[in-house]
Amino acid sequence: MKVKKMVRSLLTVSLIGLALSGCGTSAPKEQAGATAGAASSAPKGEPTQLVISTWGFSDDFFKKEIYAPFEKEHNVKIVLDTGNNADRLNKVRQGTSNVDLIYLSDYYAQQGIDAGLFEKIDRSRIPNLNDIYDMAKAPLGQDYGPAYTISQLGIAYNPKATGGKELKSWSDLWSPELAKKLTMPNITGTTGPMILDAASRVAGSTPFNEDQAFAKLKDLNKSVVKYYGQTSEFVNMFAQGEIAAGPIMEMYVKDLKAAVPETKFITPQEGGYAIMNTVNVVKGSKNKQLAEDFINYHLSKEVQEKVAKAKVDSPVNTKLQLTGADAEGITYGADTVNKLNKLDMKFVNQNLKAWIDRFNKQVAQ
């Protein structure tokens, strides 16, 4: 009897266990879900440090709107190395920085490529390349980084100060109405070589003819109040009425309009010039894939839309649909971008030293 009772008791316990197991099938799943949720929100360990070399403008905007979401998503701590193009590139060249990712104008980026300072990027890891302007995809070759923004060099002028002259062409800079009312970029600046190319076009030479370009600039010199090196110089002279017109990047026109509301900006009939800022992975980076992830992120529709609406950069992502005030003051739309003239930066780098010397001797005397 004791044996029968023991067997009966064991059967009862087993049946109760099975019943509880059957009634509680959802409990283990809920517990697993809670564990997974806790794991996803739990600290992932020390964040990876990603060092980005950039200019440092609009710093607060980038930290809050661009860097912070990426840091959170990828468990990353972004560290910035800021300064101008030349200084930052020299740090990488000299090996005195631990930069992973570097933002440079295409002119300086070409120098970095020529010096072997950048990694070849894996384009398969950057699918958002498919959504940007063709001009921006590989401005310096398929092995290197894209342009994340394209602005244009055109002409800004004050119609009240040009004697009613309406500017439409690069050739209009040579108009007598602008005598002693003109500013031009210094040959050493980013846009200096573009003006040299524009002068060649005005002289009727396409492709570029160096002798004719310098002859035209020498003829223009008598109308130039100052060759500006910083955009702030243009803005100050324009606001004070010292100049009536000059070539300038479109992104700075908002500053001119703040000082002179009637300011006009034109894309010359011969085409404006594409000014492209690029992003590249520095050779030897231990975070190459993470850096490529960041490039892809920066090219996304969401990020490009943020920077465009904030008037920080002109977008290259073609999925954006900007209208009205959102599109004002930035270089936007395929119709505009595809008509821009693009210089061969390798050719520019090979010749710039000689051009600067010739400019100083023959033009700006």
Image: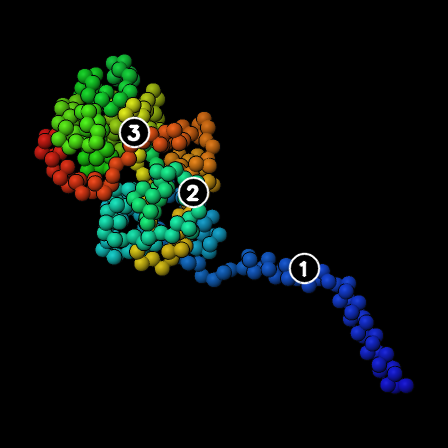
Q: Distance from label 2 to label 3 (Cα)?
A: 25 Å
In the rendered image, which quarter is residue 66 located in? top left
Residue type at mark 3?
Gly
Q: Can residue 307 be seen here?
A: no
In terms of secondary structure, where does tag 2 sit? helix
Which residue, as the protein is rendered here, is positioned at the far right?
1
Q: Dot 2 corresponds to which residue?
A: 130
| Sequence-first tag of 3 and 1 | 1
* Tags 2 and 3 touching, CB below 8 Å: no
Q: Is residue 187 left or right of residue 248?
A: left
Residue type at mark 2?
Asn
Residue type at mark 1?
Glu
Residue 250 locus on image (x, y percent)? 33, 30
Q: Dot 3 corresponds to which residue?
A: 272
Work out which quarter of the rendered image holds the N terminus and state it.
bottom right
Closer to the camera: disc 3 or disc 1?
A: 3
Residue 312 locus on image (x, y percent)? 38, 37
* 309 relative to 296, above or below: above
In terms of secondary structure, where does tag 1 sit? helix
In terms of secondary structure, where does tag 3 sit? loop
| Residue density around tag 3, few if under 14, some if 14–19, many if 20 or more, within 10 Å | many
Residue 185 locus on image (x, y percent)? 22, 32
Which numbered circle lies on residue 30?
1
Work out which quarter of the rendered image holds the C terminus and state it.
top left
Which residue, as the protein is rendered here, is positioned at the far bottom?
2
